[in-house]
Amino acid sequence: MKRFLTPVLALSTAFVLRAENWPQFRGPTGQGLSEERNLPLKWDATNGIAWKTALPGEGWSSPIVWNDRVFVTSDTDAGVTCSACASPR
């Protein structure tokens, strides 16, 4: 999961500069819908990435986008220790 979540975080940040807030799983209304237009349809390890970072343990939450920040959580020690991580400003 850790290897998958890092690119997701990085991609999420690419949208932050102009995106609506995404405060919960499946977005503001819980329906997975966004009012944003002209979003990229393709990305990879080098294209469409604003930043990326390694997370401790395994990611197990939906990213939250709030203004210019992206927040995620991860756990280590089989869920005994939890961490919240935020994107750089």
Image (spheres, helix red, strand yellow):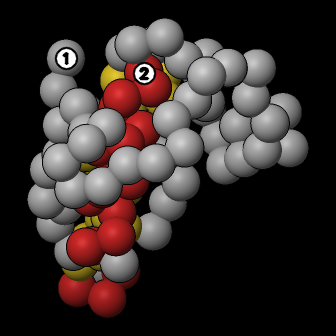
Q: Quadrant of the N terminus?
A: bottom left
Reading the chain from its start, which is encountered first: label 1 or label 2?
2
Based on the displayed image, in which of its 4 quarters is residue 75 positioned? bottom left
Based on the displayed image, in which of its 4 quarters is residue 32 positioned? top right
| Residue toward you, 23 or 12 | 12
Query: How many callouts does the rendering have?
Result: 2
Horizontal arrangement in the rendering, residue 4 relative to residue 39 (left or right): left
At a point 18% along the width and 37% down the height, the residue shown is 51
At a point 53% along the width and 54% down the height, the residue shown is 62
Q: Position of residue 89 (x, y in %)?
A: 19, 17
Q: Position of residue 43 (x, y in %)?
A: 38, 49
Residue 57 vertical placement versus 72 (above, below): below
| Amino acid type, mark 1 | Arg
* Circles 1, 2 touching at the beta carbon (< 8 Å): no
Residue 65 seen in the current view: yes
The answer for how far apart the CA atoms under marks 1 and 2 are is: 11 Å
Q: Position of residue 31 (x, y in %)?
A: 86, 44
Label 2 crowding class (10 Å Cα cut-off): few <14, some 14-19, many 20+?
some
| Residue toward you, 69 or 18 | 18
Q: Position of residue 64 (x, y in %)?
A: 50, 38
Q: Secondary structure at mark 1?
A: loop
Label 1 crowding class (10 Å Cα cut-off): few <14, some 14-19, many 20+?
few
| Amino acid type, mark 2 | Val
Reading the image, the residue beneath label 1 is 89
Comparing labels 1 and 2, the label whose residue is closer to the camera: 2
Reading the image, the residue beneath label 2 is 16
Q: Residue furthest bottom?
A: 78
Residue 72 seen in the current view: no
Horizontal arrangement in the rendering, residue 54 relative to residue 1 (left or right): left
At a point 45% along the width and 26% down the height, the residue shown is 15
Q: Secondary structure at mark 2?
A: helix
